[in-house]
Image (cartoon, rainbow, N blue to C red):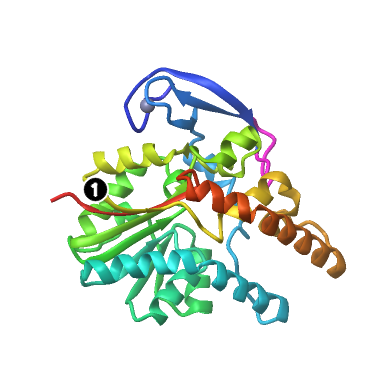
């Protein structure tokens, strides 16, 4: 048993044994455990890096093309990304720090394109060459294939570092947070978002909760675990947000019906007729819409299925 990322404790109890429910990249079963001291939920043992790479299919990243369905999908993505964009915009404007916004795990770069439209200089990093390439070609945002701990940013050069759904995938989230801390300007901002294991959705759905995303999620933070980790890496929390239109209602739909999840269908290359695809998309959208009241209610009570945090370096 490995030591706990948050508290260093060595005791843990078994919670679930699960396989890759969403993308079916493997039949292997993984153990999800809970720290006996602080309660952090995590995968243990972590698969070694070479094995982990196999659980990220090569078509994991969204690459819009020029057809009508793809343009419609991009419009939907822009609409539901507005929570992220507004949160980051507020952080940047209120801090007044100078320098670029660096988005770590930028994927196809749509968030960066939207931030640049609002007047902010942006740079994307992704460990996937494929993703960084899509961000360059499709969104025309500067993006490079790099890991944050080795990226050559001068100390204090960045106004903000964002990591949406990144920390839970990392073998060593602490190293990334410390690297982000060094890159940030004196009043720069760190913006992180992760699934929240203290959510109603996890309590309700248990092992079927999409936020576990075994085996890609190595850690399943509660909001309190994330805040404790941030504090131990030299950050203080400025603001929290529990609602995400993109992630929270759709997460419920993917939990209930993983085989309807549009990305899972793409990743698994399931054969579909046009009619079948539209029917599944509409059904998925209907479940997502039906989950909206639950997502709003859990977020209003501080138990949203994702948590977004703005933090700054402790003086
Ligand atoms: Zn612990």
Q: Residue at x 60, y 66 (%)?
A: 62
Q: Can you see residue 100?
A: yes
Q: Position of residue 22 (x, y in %)?
A: 67, 46
Position of 98 with respect to 207 (left or right) is left
Q: Residue at x 42, y 27 (%)?
A: 39
The picture quadrant where one finds residue 101 is bottom left
Q: How many marks?
A: 1
- As helix, strand or loop, the secondary structure at mark 1 comes to strand
- The quarter of the rendering in which ligand 1 is drawn is top left
Q: Residue at x 39, y 78 (%)?
A: 116
Position of 77 with respect to 112 (left or right) is right
Q: Residue at x 66, y 82 (%)?
A: 66
Q: Nearer the viewer, residue 207 or 23?
A: 207
Q: Which portion, as a residue range, is magenta?
A: 20-29
Residue for badge 1 = 236
Q: Can you see residue 305?
A: no
Query: What is the crowding at mark 1: few (fewer than 14 residues within 10 Å), some, or many (at least 20)?
Result: some
Q: Is residue 201 magenta?
A: no
What quarter of the picture does the N terminus occupy?
A: top left
In the rendered image, the vertical position of residue 254 relative to residue 101, given as above or below: above
Q: Is residue 26 magenta?
A: yes
Q: Nearer the viewer, residue 177 or 232?
A: 232
Q: Position of residue 114 (x, y in %)?
A: 45, 76
In the rendered image, the vertical position of residue 20 relative to residue 156, given as above or below: above
Q: Position of residue 296 (x, y in %)?
A: 55, 53
Q: Which residue is outermost to the left?
A: 315
Position of 183 with respect to 71 (left or right) is left
The answer as to whether callout 1 falls within 8 Å of ligand 1 is: no
Majority secondary structure of the magenta segment? loop
Q: Nearer the viewer, residue 49 or 162?
A: 162
Q: Position of residue 129 (x, y in %)?
A: 49, 63
In the rendered image, the vertical position of residue 48 relative to residue 111, given as above or below: above
């Amino acid at each position: 048993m490995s030591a706990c990322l948050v508290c260093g404790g060595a005791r843990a109890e078994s919670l679930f044994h699960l396989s890759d429910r969403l993308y079916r990249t493997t039949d292997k079963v993984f153990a999800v455990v809970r720290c006996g001291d602080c309660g952090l939920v995590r995968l243990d043992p972590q698969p070694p890096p070479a094995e982990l790479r196999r659980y990220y299919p090569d078509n994991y990243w969204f690459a819009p093309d020029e057809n009508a369905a793809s343009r419609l999908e991009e419009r939907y993505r822009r609409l539901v990304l507005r929570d992220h964009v507004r949160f980051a915009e507020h952080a940047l404007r209120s801090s007044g720090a100078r320098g670029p916004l660096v988005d770590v795990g930028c994927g196809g770069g749509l968030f960066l394109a939207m931030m640049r439209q609002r007047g902010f200089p942006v740079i994307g990093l992704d460990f996937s060459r494929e993703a960084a390439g899509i961000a360059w070609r499709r969104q025309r945002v500067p993006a490079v294939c790099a890991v944050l701990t080795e990226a050559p940013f001068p100390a204090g050069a960045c106004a903000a570092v964002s990591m949406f759904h990144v920390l839970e995938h990392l073998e060593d989230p602490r190293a990334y947070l410390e690297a982000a801390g060094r890159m940030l300007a004196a009043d720069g901002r760190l913006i992180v978002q992760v699934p929240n294991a203290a959510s109603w959705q996890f309590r309700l759905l248990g092992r079927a909760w999409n936020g576990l995303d075994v085996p890609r999620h190595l850690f399943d933070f509660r909001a309190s675990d994330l805040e404790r980790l941030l504090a131990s890496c030299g950050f203080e929390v400025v603001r929290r947000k529990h609602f995400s239109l993109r992630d929270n209602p759709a997460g419920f739909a993917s939990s209930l019906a993983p085989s309807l999840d549009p990305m899972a269908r793409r990743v698994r290359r399931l054969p579909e007729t046009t009619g079948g695809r539209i029917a599944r998309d509409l059904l998925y959208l209907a479940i997502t819409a039906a989950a909206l009241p639950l997502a709003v209610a859990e977020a209003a009570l501080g138990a949203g299925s994702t948590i977004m945090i703005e933090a700054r370096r402790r003086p």
